[in-house]
Image (spheres, helix red, strand yellow):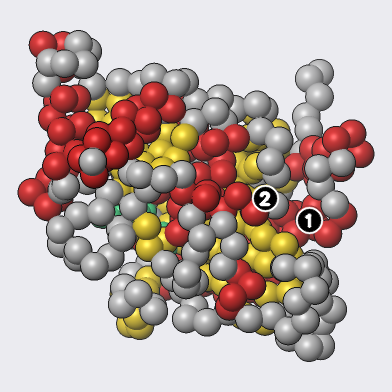
Amino acid sequence: MTRRISLTQYLIEQQRQHGHIPQELRLLIEVVARACKRIAISVNKGALGDVLGTAGSENVQGEVQKKLDIIANEVLIEANEWGGHLAAMASEEMEGIYLVPNRFPQGEYLLMFDPLDGSSNIDVNVSIGTIFSVLKKPEGSKGISEDDFLQPGSAQAAAGYCVYGPQTTLVLTVGDGVAMFTLDREQGSFVLTQEDVKIPEDTKEFAINMSNMRHWDAPVKRYIDECLAGEEGPRGKNFNMRWIASMVADVHRILTRGGVFMYPWDKREPNKAGKLRLMYEANPMAFLVEQAGGAATNARERIMDLKPTKLHERVAVVLGSKNEVERVTRYHLEQAQ
Ligand code: AHG
Ligand code: MN
Ligand code: MN
C-alpha cells in the first residue's frame, strides 16, 4: 500500500527535518485548513444550505457581498481567534483589522485572507476558493495596529489557497517549495498529492479578461496582440486562452500546467493601480508562484518587493510562467523609457 501523508504529518516532518515550521505556525496552518474544510462543506451544499445569493451588504471596496463571502469570513475568524497562535487578522471583507479578543492568548502571527475568491462564480457552480497569507508581527511591537500588517510580500512566513472545485485542494508554501493536498472527504483530511510543484518557464496559454481590451495600456495590448497572431506572428506559435474569473482557479491551472495570468492596470479606473488586492490576493499568489519557479510582477516591479501603504491596497498583477512574465514586464519597462 502506498503511504498516504496527511497535512498534519507533512507539517510535522517539515518541522522536524527542515526546521521550516515553528510550532505556532504549524498550528496556524492546520487551523486554516480546518476552516477551509468547513467552508468546503458550505460551498458543496449550495442551494440546499441556503448559502447562494447576495447578503444585501457591501464591503469596504464597494463590492456587493455574497452570503458565502460573509460565511467564509466568519468561519475563518471563529476558527483562528482562540488558538493562541495569532495577534490579529485582516480580511478583504472587513474594513479594519481584527484583534484577537483579550480573553484569548495572543500569538506572534498575523493572518490575512480573501475568504471567498471568485464570488461571481458562487451561484453558477464554478470553482472558487480561499486565499491566505501569514506574516509575523514586527519585533518589539506591543499593541497591534494596521501598520504592523504593511510588510512586503517577501516577509511572508507562509501562504496558500484552498480551491473548491471538482476536488477541494489546499496549496501551501512555507518558503520551501509548493505542496498540494487533496481533501479526502471520507477521511475528512487533506492528503499530500503533489510535492515540489514546478511551473514550466514557457507556455502557450494566457489568462486575461479580454472584454477590457479597449481600456488596456499599450504594452498589454502589444503582448496579447502578439499571442493572438499565432504561428504567423512574431511569437511563431499559437496561444490558447482561459479566464475563469476566480484567481484561485486560474492560478491553480498555472501551477498545474503553466500559463500567464494578468489583471493589469486599465483606463476604467485610472487612479487605481489594478483590481486585485495586494495583501489578500497578489502577495500570497506571488509567493506560491515564485516558490514554484514562476514570476510575479505588477508589470514593472516584483510584487513581493512592494511596500504596502494601506491594508486594502490594490495592485496590477502579472504572474505565472517566468519567460512570459518577463516579456510582459519588459514591454512595460520599454514603454516607460
Ligand atoms: P473576489 O471574488 O474575491 O472579489 O475576487 C475576484 C477577482 C479574482 O478572483 C478574479 O480573477 C477577478 O476578480 C475577476 O474579475 P472580472 O470579473 O473583472 O473578470
Ligand atoms: Mn478575490
Ligand atoms: Mn473575495
Q: Are marks 1 and 2 in contact (CB under 8 Å)?
A: yes
Q: Position of residue 232 (x, y in %)?
A: 10, 11
Can you identify the residue that label 1 sits on?
Answer: 25
- Classify mark 1: helix, strand or loop: helix
Q: Residue at x 68, y 67 (%)?
A: 110
7 left or right of 278? right
Query: Do we see residue 204 in this rendering?
Result: yes
Tell whether 255 sits left or right of 123.
right
Q: Amino acid at mark 2?
A: Ala
Q: Is residue 61 above or below residue 26?
A: below
Residue found at the very far front of the displayed protein: 337
Q: In what element is the residue under mark 2?
A: strand
Badge 1: residue crowd in 10 Å (few <14, some 14–19, many ≥20): many
Residue 143, image x, y percentages: 73, 84
Which residue is tagged 2? Answer: 158
In this rendering, position of residue 265 left or right of residue 75: left
| Ligand 1 placement by image quarter | bottom left
Most extreme residue toward the right, as rendered? Answer: 16
Q: How many marks?
A: 2
- Image position, residue 207 (x, y; %): 29, 37
Q: Return the x and y of residue 141 as percentages of the image width and height.
A: 75, 76
Q: Nearer the viewer, residue 232 or 100?
A: 232
